[in-house]
Image (cartoon, rainbow, N blue to C red):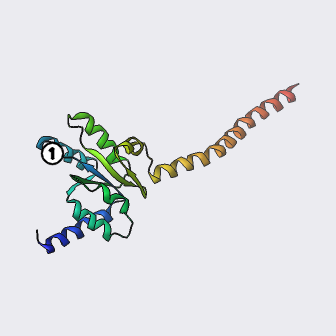
Amino acid sequence: MKKEDKSTIIKEIESTLGQYAHFYLTDIGGLNAEQTSELRRTCFNQKIKLLVVKNTLLRKALENSENDFSQLYDILKGETSLMLSDTGNAPAKLIKDFSKKNKAKKPVLKAAYVEESFYIGEGMLEELVHIKSKNELIGDIIGLLQSPAKNVVSALQSGGTTIHGVLKTLGER
């Protein structure tokens, strides 16, 4: 491969990484053509971009990034594919479900960059499946903040009818 071609591919990888908030490094080696096609189709349906990349080109793209991805450099060995998504836990769920269905137990999680944190190793998959996105966390906080106000309003509303009933009874006596 010519140097110009490599630099073009590196720039493409850089721009692709810049378009997505989260990415996963996985190993999909060992899947046959049918399984690979099914994986690509599933990724497309769940709005996850799947790229098979050369480790050296991916490393150069990560080095050129404004973020420090040095923790991921040691993981870039063997076959590596990138799963890119705007939803932090979507690729983790896909990896978990898809690896259950095939004998090769692939794809295998190598590492992930989710919500500005690094998750390294296959053992982190379960944690990534249950991670909440920023919007989900904001929704939870808003729900918690609204809960006491709702309780006060409902108590006042129900208390008003109780007080009214007591006053009415006293008035009749």
Q: How many callouts does the rendering have?
A: 1
Q: Quadrant of residue 93?
A: top left
Front-lying residue, 171 or 25: 25
- Seen at 29% across and 43% down, the residue is 95
Residue 94, percent across and down?
Answer: 30, 43
Q: For the view shown, which residue lies furthest in the bottom direction?
A: 4
CA neighbours of label 1 inside 10 A, class few (<14), some (14 to 19), many (20+): few
Q: Nearer the viewer, residue 96 or 155?
A: 96
Q: Quick one: 110 or 99, which is closer to the camera?
A: 110
Q: Where is residue 22? Give x, y as percent.
A: 36, 56
* Quadrant of res 172: top right
Residue 24: give x, y in percent of width and height.
31, 52
Decide if residue 107 is on the left or right side of residue 66.
Answer: left
- Identified by mark 1, the residue type is Ser
Vertical placement of residue 166 versus 63, above or below: above
x 30%, y 54%: residue: 75
Residue at the right extreme? 173
Q: Would you place residue 42 above or below residue 169 in this image?
A: below
Residue in the image at 32% along x and 47% along y: 91
Q: Which residue is mark 1?
A: 37
Q: Residue at x 38, y 47 (%)?
A: 89
Q: Position of residue 16 (x, y in %)?
A: 27, 63
In this orientation, which residue lies closer to the viewer: 117 or 89?
117
Question: Where's the N terminus, which quadrant?
Answer: bottom left
Q: Quadrant of the C terminus?
A: top right
Residue ranking furthest to the top: 173
Left or right: where does residue 36 sit relative to residue 72? left
Q: Secondary structure at mark 1?
A: helix
Camera sees residue 93: yes
From the viewer's perspective, tell me whether residue 159 is left or right of residue 13. Answer: right
Residue 15: tell me if it is visible: no
